[in-house]
Amino acid sequence: MNEAKTVAIIGAGPVGLAATAHVLERGLTPIVLEAGDTAGHSVRQWGHVQLFSPWEYNIDGAAARLLASIGWNSPEPDQYPTGSELVERYLEPLATKTVLANHI
């Protein structure tokens, strides 16, 4: 008997949301378990800090494909975001405006 399994993903930060996007692309059912009030909760704690890597290394391919389906425009790939920008321009739209919202 082939019973569908639910994939538990711990955390709704950049890695957790990217993992969720990949799970969805594979046709599996994810459930994201986040301790904070919103996606990117931990990142918000250091929102004033500029990241050490530019956008091109902070946006996952599967997540970008989900965002593209809602008309999202990717930030300039060579710009270095702050934690707040990462949340506002990437994590929030991914977590609230795509199919990921149904799994968090």
Image (cartoon, grey):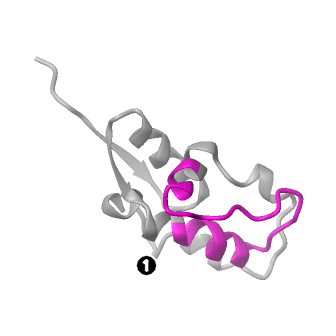
Q: Position of residue 99 (x, y in %)?
A: 38, 57
Q: Position of residue 97 (x, y in %)?
A: 44, 68
Considering the numbered disc 1 on the image, is that residue within a helix, a strand or a loop?
Answer: loop
40 sits left or right of 20 in the view:
right
In the image, residue 72 sits, relative to residue 63, either above or below, namely: below
Quadrant of the rendered image containing residue 44: bottom right
Q: Residue at (60%, 52%) from the top-left corner?
A: 64
Q: Position of residue 67 (x, y in %)?
A: 54, 58
83 sits left or right of 5 in the view:
right
Q: Residue at (56%, 55%) from the top-left corner?
A: 68
Picture quarter with the N terminus: top left
Residue reaching furthest to the top: 1
Which residue is tagged 1? 37
Q: Residue at (59%, 71%) from the top-left corner?
A: 42
36 sits left or right of 46 in the view:
left
Quadrant of the rendered image containing residue 104: bottom left
Residue reaching furthest to the front: 71
In the image, residue 95 sits, relative to residue 41, either above or below, namely: above
Q: Residue at (86%, 66%) from the top-left corner?
A: 80
Count of numbered labels shown in the rendering: 1
Q: Position of residue 14 (x, y in %)?
A: 60, 57
Q: Amino acid at mark 1?
A: Asp
- Which class describes the residues within 10 Å of circle 1: few (<14), some (14-19), or many (20+)? few
Quadrant of the rendered image containing residue 3: top left
Residue reaching furthest to the left: 1
In the image, residue 85 lies in the stretch drawn in magenta:
yes
What is the magenta range?
Answer: 65-93
In the image, residue 4 sits, relative to residue 15, either above or below, namely: above
In the image, residue 3 lies in the stretch drawn in magenta:
no
